[in-house]
Image (tube, helix red, strand yellow):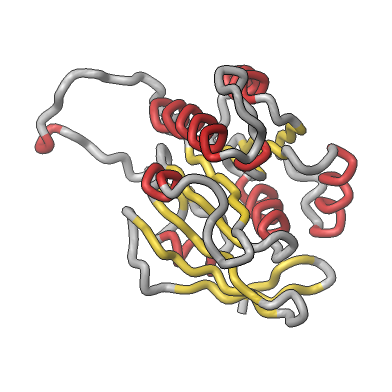
Amino acid sequence: KTVRNKKTSYSASRLSDIDVPDNIRILTKINEFDRVLGGGLVLGSAVLLAGEPGIGKSTLLMQLCGKAADNYTVLYVSGEESKNQLKMRAERLGVAEAGVLVLCETDLDSVVNEYERVSPDVVIVDSVQTMVSASVDSFAGSPTQVRECSSQLITRAKADGCAIVLVGHVTKDGNIAGPKTLEHMVDAVLNFEGDRSQSHRIVRAIKNRYGSTNEIGVFEMTDVGLEEV
């Protein structure tokens, strides 16, 4: 298991004195996904995976969790499904025996408390539009809630060196739901595209601070999940 350095420094450092560890990236073992990211998830980074409801975002991320849990502590936070639903999907995908930690919760404070307790290397939040912060007097999915919840989660993950993936839905006109600032807050924005009546799916980076935006990942949706093409 990779041990992360959670000590946060608030003093300035010389660039020449900064040592980047060799294991700064987490290989998800899904080659198409790793390539789009530029070589895997970067510890301390925030990724937004956006796509239409039902396109397969949760399927892809559950498969990712199942593979990454072999070497890392993975926390899957779902605000849309129950634990039974998550287990049923994991069984269909063949990752039910993986050591993935699941939390079905929409209250941000509860999510943060569990995050601190388990100290994960990778966090999946599915979806950010379902999270609610008690400090904001607004409904779930509103621009202020999405901005506040995302900001708190990203800030904490970056301070701890944890890789966080936020799932975002898109509107009917193809734009990511929520405030436009959400795309500026994250390090990478990935679009998960495809026609639900067809089997093929594409992951495309439209922003990536740690890699190229010229790569795409191609998958085929099957009865047992997404297969790389």
- Nearest the viewer among 150 and 92 is 150
Position of 191 relative to 164 (above/below): below
Judge from the rendering whether residue 43 lies leftward or rightward of residue 137; answer left or right.
Answer: left
User: Which residue is pictured at 63% across the width and 40% down the height?
Assistant: 141
> Which image quadrant: the N terminus?
top right
User: Which residue is pictured at 74% across the width and 31% down the height?
Assistant: 103
Position of 224 relative to 59 (above/below): below
> Which image quadrant: the C terminus?
bottom right
The x and y percentages for residue 167 are 60, 49
Report how many numbered discs are placed on residues in the image.
0
Q: Is residue 140 visible?
A: yes
The x and y percentages for residue 49 are 55, 55
Judge from the rendering whether residue 89 lies leftward or rightward of residue 184; answer left or right.
Answer: right
Judge from the rendering whether residue 105 lies leftward or rightward of residue 154; answer left or right.
Answer: right
User: Which residue is pictured at 50% across the width and 51% down the height?
Assistant: 48
User: Which residue is pictured at 54% across the width and 45% down the height?
Assistant: 165
The x and y percentages for residue 227 are 69, 72
User: Which image quadrant for residue 23?
Assistant: top left
- Nearest the viewer among 206 and 165 is 206
Position of 3 relative to 87 (above/below): above
The x and y percentages for residue 66 are 69, 49
- Nearest the viewer among 200 and 227 is 200
Q: Is residue 125 visible?
A: no
Position of 2 relative to 156 (above/below): below
Judge from the rendering whether residue 129 lies leftward or rightward of residue 18; answer left or right.
Answer: right
User: Which image quadrant for residue 92?
Assistant: bottom right
